Amino acid sequence: MSNKKDLSIRLSPADNVVVARLDLLRGTELPGEGVKLIDHAPAGHKIATAAIVKGDAVVKYSQVIGFANCNISPGQHVHVQNCEMADFERDYAYCSRVEPIDYVHKSKRATFQGYRRSNGKVGTRNYIGILTSVNCSATVARYIADAFNETGILKDYPYVDGVVPFVHSTGCGMAGNGDGYDALTRTLFGYASHPNFAGILMVGLGCEVNQIPYLMKRYGMEDNNRFQHLTIQQEGGTRKAVDAAIARIKKMLPEANAIQRETVPASELTLALQCGGSDGYSGITSNPALGSAVDLLVRHGGTAILSETPEIYGAEHLLTMRAVNREVGEKLIERIKWWEDYAHRNGGEMNNNPSPGNKDGGLTTILEKSLGAAAKGGTLNLAGVYKYAEQIDTKGLCFMDSPGYDPCSVTGQVASGANVICFTTGRGSVFGFKPAPSIKVATNTRMFTNMSEDMDINAGSIADGERTVAEVGEEIFRLVLAVASGDQTKSEELGFGGNEFIPWQIGAVM
């Protein structure tokens, strides 16, 4: 990768750019590249190492990340001023790189301390959740949670992690069928059955499009000691609904508090993979390291969920090559085509990314960002492709369709079954997400040092030449096991995670 004396990072002999490891001034010579900088290149940004003719591909990771919109000379800073997005043919080569997985023998697999639920699922946290069917019940849900979290009630239940309201902005003023309705109901069912909850209370208004009885019938749910529901209208208004809800949750607390962690195999982990506030180092340090951790988890029998479809756009061929069969690969491409149409009919474009912060950090096009983002998925086979919030029923690396908007994407991943989250960031995210603990991995040492109270792991040591991708990947894997066993993440220590529940709102608001 690099050592402490390197001024730049070359990712492949086929590349015609390298990445500045430090803030490099004009006139700086790059050892080993035979190039002197024509421009200033900030850390994480690209420098041309060969002449690139207008219209030719800019190559990084040995992949196309964009095209020169003017002639680029060796030593020039390569970024938005001279590199742009353009469509190009990609060979999906379905299943061409599928290889047998070297699984760790069951007797030697890693373990963690988890909560085994009566349905066989395993949780990493022990919350009581208050789900809302519609925005109209959001305030009541918060009042109910406040009655437990802002009083001394929970002190008698030390093994309950908290009572958490999950409020959102939809549930009515929407079609009662179609993509949007299906995504919302899948999300709510996924949370209602999630193993990180000891109990769930679902609260509705009563007259909304998203009717709780229909949701329960659709997914075979019924009231029991773990799941309850009520509506504000039926209970007689706000105060009566709050009082009734408090009484029901109080009945759940003793059983929730009685459950104990037990030793379970790492195969019970489902890890959500996310990146946000990415920079030029994301695809070099944190994302490949997370990919290495994913390979370890899969070899130990576990599951990982890669998502953010607009942020694998342009790198999807690297996943279809690893699809376990053509059907899985074609499912991914069907989602890509859906997104192209979705963007078009809403007046958008797939290259609306990178964000201003991503660009400041050195990312130029969605192609470059996607190639780095896809690295979170490691190197092993793609076992399945799922719609947003669809229940993951396949072990190994899976893909769940979602927007690139982090909280919306994670909402779907948790609904699909993720019980731990790993979130990489280069600019510095303060993300947390109840009920699943979120581990944050910094791409660079500078940001890790600046935001040390928010970051759990520093993958910047890879670019610093101090550690390898595999070594940081091992650290991530071990921390995932520890966090799954109850160790708190930085975001949990700071109290994050109660405001990030955002179901994907697809379709017209009516």
Image (cartoon, grey):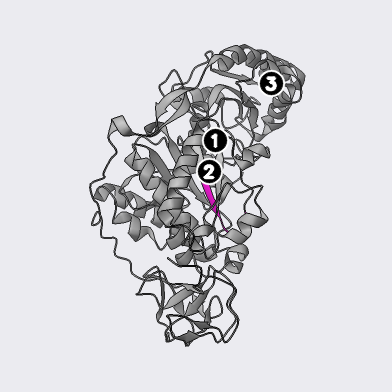
Residue 40 can be seen, yes or no: yes
> Mark 2, mark 1: which one is toward the viewer?
1
Q: Which of 215 and 276 is in front in this view?
A: 276
User: Is disc 1 surrounded by few (<14), some (14 to 19) or many (20+) residues within 10 Å?
Assistant: many
Whether pointer 2 and pointer 1 mark residues with C-beta atoms closer than 8 Å, the reply is: yes
The question of residue 54 being in magenta is answered with no
Residue 51 placement (x, y as % from top left): 43, 87
Q: Quadrant of residue 372?
A: bottom left
Q: Residue shown at 43%/52% (left/top)? A: 471
The kind of residue on which mark 1 rests is: Ala
The residue singled out by tag 3 in the image is: 233
The question of residue 424 being in magenta is answered with yes
Residue 113 placement (x, y as % from top left): 47, 27
The residue singled out by tag 1 in the image is: 436
User: Is disc 3 surrounded by few (<14), some (14 to 19) or many (20+) residues within 10 Å?
Assistant: some
User: Is disc 2 surrounded by few (<14), some (14 to 19) or many (20+) residues within 10 Å?
Assistant: many
Q: Residue shown at 60%/49% (left/top)? A: 455
Q: What stretch is highlighted in magenta?
A: 422-428
Q: Is mark 2 on a helix, strand or loop?
A: helix
